[in-house]
Amino acid sequence: MYETCVTASEAAYLLRHRHGLPVELFAGHVLVTCNSQLGAVRMPSGLGRRVLPGLIHDRPVPAVANPRETHWTLLVDPRPPISVESNHEAQLSKYDVALLQHGYRVWLPTSDTGIGWHWITEPAPSPLLLPPLPSVLSTIYRLLKQAAIP
């Protein structure tokens, strides 16, 4: 993906123009900020390995892993906005799942080396189309419910 990129600025340009991500540069890092048009769900990598294939979406769901690959962050479409009841939020946090709030920054990879932040699933090279948050949450709830059944 980044074969032609040497700097973070070039990686940001590629992510903006080829993949439609609203990226920013901050202290030499490329990131997206959660807002009303782009959201994110962070979860342990073990759960992410089960959630990602369970999502029905017509394009790859962009997912990024932290450097130690302990957590994955899936980029989602937060529309339509949903209110997550406190008992659901408590259940999600019990499994270390977090809905990243408006203003939260998600670091993105700037190279293909696999060192540091890296893509689990790269965004498609086209206008950005993300899975809706409600369908990501329903997949998570379904998998958590299945795991709770002995």
Image (tube, helix red, strand yellow):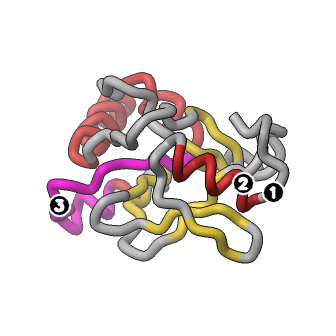
Percent across and percent down for residue 11 are 69, 51
> Which labelled disc corresponds to residue 81?
3
Tell me whether the residue at label 2 lies in contact with that at label 1, contact meaning CB atoms closer than 8 angstroms: yes
Residue at 59% across, 45% down:
64
Precedes in sequence: disc 3 or disc 1: 1
Image height check: is 49 above or below 72?
above
- Residue at mark 2: 10
Q: Which residues are magenta?
A: 72-91
Q: Nearer the viewer, residue 64 or 72?
A: 64
Percent across and percent down for residue 129 are 34, 40
Quarter the C terminus occupies = top left
Along the horizontal axis of the image, is 142 left or right of 95? Answer: left
Amino acid type, label 1: Thr
- Residue at mark 1: 7
Residue 52 location, quadrant: top left
Tell me whether the residue at label 3 lies in contact with that at label 1, contact meaning CB atoms closer than 8 angstroms: no
Q: CA distance from mark 2 to mark 1?
A: 5 Å
Label 1 SS = loop
> Which labelled disc corresponds to residue 73?
none
Neighbour tally class for label 3: few under 14, some 14-19, many 20 plus, Cα within 10 Å: few
Amino acid type, label 2: Glu
Amino acid type, label 3: Pro
Label 3 SS = loop
Q: Nearer the viewer, mark 3 or mark 1?
A: 1
Quarter the N terminus occupies = top right
Is residue 15 visible to us here? yes
Neighbour tally class for label 1: few under 14, some 14-19, many 20 plus, Cα within 10 Å: some
Neighbour tally class for label 2: few under 14, some 14-19, many 20 plus, Cα within 10 Å: some
Precedes in sequence: disc 2 or disc 3: 2
Q: Nearer the viewer, residue 140 or 119?
A: 119
Q: CA distance from mark 3 to mark 1?
A: 36 Å
Percent across and percent down for residue 137 are 28, 44
